[in-house]
C-alpha cells in the first residue's frame, strides 16, 4: 500500500512540476519565428495607436513615395494653425491662378475651384479627405506660406523635423515623386494627428461629400459601404501615382483598441486593401490576445 501511495505521489509531483514549467500562451510575435502576412506591397507597418508600438512591419524604415498621403502633413499643419488661432474652419481661402488651373487638370484628383470665389477651410479639408483634391492642398499651402506651394514645402519639412519624422516634402498635394517618407513615420504622423486633433476623423470617415452642389465618393474603399469595407475603419488617407504605386494609411477601432496601418507601393487597389486588412487584423489579434492572456478577461489567471 505504501509503495502504491509513494508511486502516486511521485507521479503527481512530476505533473505539477511539468505544469509549473509551462509558460502562459504568448500572443507576442516570436522574433526567432517571424510571422509572414504575405503582403504584396514594398513597405508596411501596423502600430498600436495608444502607444505607437509597431506590431508588425515590412521595411518600415525605408523611405518611399507617399503620393497623396502627403496631404496628411498639409492637413496637420492646417489644424495646428487653427489651434494656434491663425485661422479657423470658417476662414475663407482665396484661389490663385495656379490653384484654379490645377483644379481642372484631368490628370489630377480634384474638385473645381473658381479663381473669383473663396472657399472655407472646412470645405477644403472635406475635399482633401474624401476626394483627395490636389488643388485644395495647393490653395491651402499658398495661403499658409504667403507664397507658393514650394514655399509651403519648407514649412512642411520644418514640421517633419520637429516631429522627428524620416520624411521630406517638395509639394503640398503629393504629385512630386521626390516626396519621401518611411512607413513608420507615416504611421506616427497619423497617430499624432488623431491624438491632437481627433476631429479629423469626422472628415476621414466620410464616404461621400457634397461640394458646392456636386456629390463625390470617397477614394478610401475601406470605409463603410465601400468595395473593401473593413469593420471599424474611420479613415485615413489614400494615395496613388505611377512612382508611388497604390498607398494607404488606414485606421480602425475594435472594442477600445485602435490600430493604424500603412501600406506603400502596392501593385493594385485590391492588393492595397488586402495588405491593409491583413495588417489591421494582425494588429488587433496581438492587442486582443494581450488582454485575454494578461488581463482580467483571462479565464485561467
Image (tube, grey):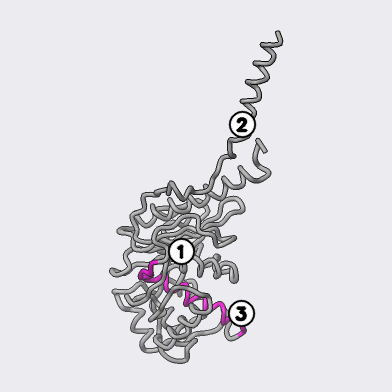
How many dots with numbers? 3
Residue lying farthest to the top in this orientation: 1
Q: Which circle marks residue 264 in the picture?
A: none
Query: Residue 14, relative to residue 233: is it above or below?
Result: above
Q: Quadrant of residue 84?
A: bottom right
**The residue tagged with tag 2: helix, strand or loop?**
helix
Q: Is residue 124 visible?
A: no
Residue lying farthest to the front in this orientation: 3
Residue span colored magenta: 62-85
Q: Which circle marks residue 83 in the picture?
A: 3
Mark 3 vs mark 2, foreground winner is 2
- Residue 154 lies left or right of residue 255; in this view the side is left
Q: Residue at position x 65%, y 22% from top? A: 12
Residue of label 2: 19
> Magenta includes 83?
yes
Q: Marks 3 and 1, how far apart in space? A: 26 Å
Q: Which circle marks residue 208 in the picture?
A: 1
Residue lying farthest to the bottom in this orientation: 147
Mark 2 vs mark 1, foreground winner is 2
Amino acid at each position: 500500500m505504501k509503495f502504491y501511495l509513494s508511486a502516486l505521489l511521485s507521479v503527481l509531483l512530476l505533473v505539477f512540476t511539468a505544469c509549473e514549467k509551462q509558460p502562459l500562451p504568448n500572443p507576442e510575435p516570436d522574433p526567432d519565428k517571424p510571422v509572414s502576412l504575405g503582403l504584396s506591397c514594398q513597405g508596411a507597418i501596423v502600430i498600436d495607436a495608444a502607444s505607437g508600438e509597431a506590431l508588425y512591419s515590412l521595411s518600415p524604415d525605408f523611405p518611399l513615395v507617399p503620393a497623396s498621403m502627403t496631404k496628411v502633413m498639409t492637413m496637420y499643419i492646417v489644424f495646428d494653425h487653427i489651434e494656434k488661432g491663425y485661422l479657423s474652419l470658417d476662414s475663407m481661402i482665396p484661389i490663385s491662378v495656379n490653384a484654379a488651373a490645377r483644379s481642372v487638370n484631368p490628370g489630377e484628383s480634384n474638385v473645381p475651384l473658381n479663381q473669383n470665389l473663396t472657399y472655407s477651410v472646412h470645405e477644403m479639408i472635406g475635399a482633401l479627405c474624401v476626394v483627395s483634391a490636389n488643388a485644395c492642398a495647393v490653395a491651402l499651402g499658398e495661403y499658409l506660406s504667403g507664397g507658393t506651394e514650394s514655399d509651403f514645402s519648407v514649412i512642411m519639412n520644418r514640421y517633419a523635423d520637429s516631429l522627428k519624422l524620416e520624411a521630406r516634402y517638395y509639394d503640398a498635394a503629393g504629385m512630386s515623386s521626390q516626396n519621401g517618407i518611411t512607413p513608420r513615420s507615416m504611421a506616427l504622423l497619423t497617430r499624432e494627428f488623431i491624438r491632437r486633433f481627433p476631429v479629423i476623423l469626422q472628415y476621414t470617415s466620410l464616404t461621400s461629400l457634397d461640394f458646392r452642389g456636386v456629390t463625390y465618393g470617397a477614394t478610401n474603399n475601406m470605409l463603410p459601404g465601400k468595395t473593401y469595407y473593413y469593420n471599424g475603419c474611420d479613415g485615413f488617407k489614400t494615395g496613388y501615382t505611377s512612382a508611388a504605386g497604390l498607398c494607404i494609411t488606414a485606421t480602425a477601432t475594435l472594442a477600445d483598441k485602435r490600430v493604424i496601418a500603412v501600406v506603400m507601393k502596392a501593385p493594385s487597389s485590391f492588393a492595397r486593401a488586402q495588405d491593409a486588412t491583413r495588417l489591421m487584423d494582425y494588429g488587433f489579434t496581438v492587442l486582443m490576445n494581450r488582454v485575454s492572456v494578461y488581463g482580467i478577461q483571462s479565464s485561467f489567471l
